[in-house]
Amino acid sequence: MSILELRNIYRDRLNVSNQECDYIYKVILEDLCYIDPIKIALDPNFIVPENSKKLILDSLNRICDNYPLDYIISKKNFYGYDFFVNEGVLIPRPETEELVKWILENNKNLKGTKKVIDLCSGSGCIGIVISKENNNMDVTLSDVSEKALEVCNRNKINLNSNVKSIKLDLNSKLQHPKKYDLIVSNPPYLSTKEAHKIGKNVKYEPEIALFAPINKPLHFYEKIFEFASTNLNKNGEIYLEINPIFIEDFSQLLSRFNPNDVNFRDDFRGKKRLVKVLF
Ligand SMILES: C[S@@+](CC[C@H](N)C(=O)[O-])C[C@H]1O[C@@H](n2cnc3c(N)ncnc32)[C@H](O)[C@@H]1O
């Protein structure tokens, strides 16, 4: 079958614009089959090798079933860096890039080293980028999930990063011995009540990464503030991604921990999703 015939099958089967179909097809060709997509235009009769044809058609079936393209190609670009991703981790989101940007902006002229911990690090996208972009950030990644830690260790090696990684369960009562100047986290924050509203492709992402415990949408924020009460240095700061629908409850929870200053920031969709807390 030719490269153009396969492209047309994508256009026929995918329920999106031709432009979007072509984008998906080109990504599959390039990142999964290592075939230069320019051939579609320059050599449309090029016969796709049998093994690649199988990959292309299998991928199409999975995409039709809302399986994320990023998992198919095992890759997601985040802040200009290619992160390895699989079903063990959340696919990094653009909103989270804004959290990283905020931290980097506020620490541009850092003098001396700042000890940072990324709680609930998943693929490691937040902590690894912070450490790559600012040499004065001494970053530790932490997650409870072994699968996530495997992925973040892989990203650490792929991206030649010097972050440390540790297993840390925010639900555990065990004391963690180290102190930090900055805590960053994008914890699981969807409430189970929102499960029916979220996109179909999310069904392939790990539940442990998405959902807060039933009827406790702010559970992980409480755990993060408890962690901060013992592990954050004086004048330390916390940057969090939060669920915009629970802002008021979040503010109430936060007031119990007596912060010195709180700043919310809208994401690019105009939703209050980022917060910086000074203690
Ligand atoms: C929303 S994902 C965030 C991943 C990554 N930081 C990002 O922004 O793409 C939340 C992460 O929290 C981790 N997690 C869930 N329960 C946890 C717990 N009790 N202690 C520590 N991490 C936990 C999950 O394994 C998952 O990797």
Image (tube, rainbow, N blue to C red):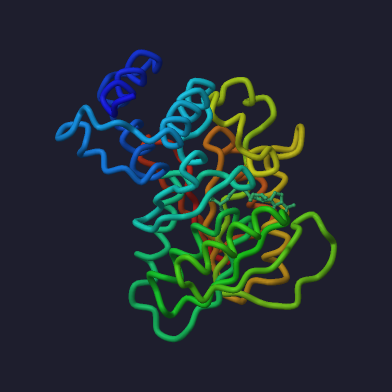
| For residue 278, side relative to residue 110 (left or right) | right
Q: Nearer the viewer, residue 52 or 113?
A: 52
Q: Position of residue 130 (x, y in %)?
A: 44, 66
Residue at the image position 85 percent from the left and 62 percent from the top: 173
Q: Quadrant of the C terminus?
A: bottom right
Q: Nearer the viewer, residue 159 or 199?
A: 159
Residue at the image position 56 percent from the left and 32 percent from the top: 245
| For residue 105, side relative to residue 147 (left or right) | left
Q: Quadrant of the N terminus?
A: top left
Q: Position of residue 127 (x, y in %)?
A: 51, 64
Choose top left, top right, bottom left or bottom right for residue 57.
Answer: top left
Q: Position of residue 264 (x, y in %)?
A: 46, 48
Q: Nearer the viewer, residue 2 or 37?
A: 2
Choose top left, top right, bottom left or bottom right for residue 257.
Answer: bottom right
Q: Nearer the viewer, residue 261 or 194?
A: 194
Query: Which residue is at the far left?
Result: 42
Residue at the image position 82 percent from the left and 59 percent from the top: 172
Q: Position of residue 25 (x, y in %)?
A: 34, 31
The image shows residue 245, relative to residue 149, as above or below, that is: above
Residue at the image position 77 percent from the left and 33 percent from the top: 214
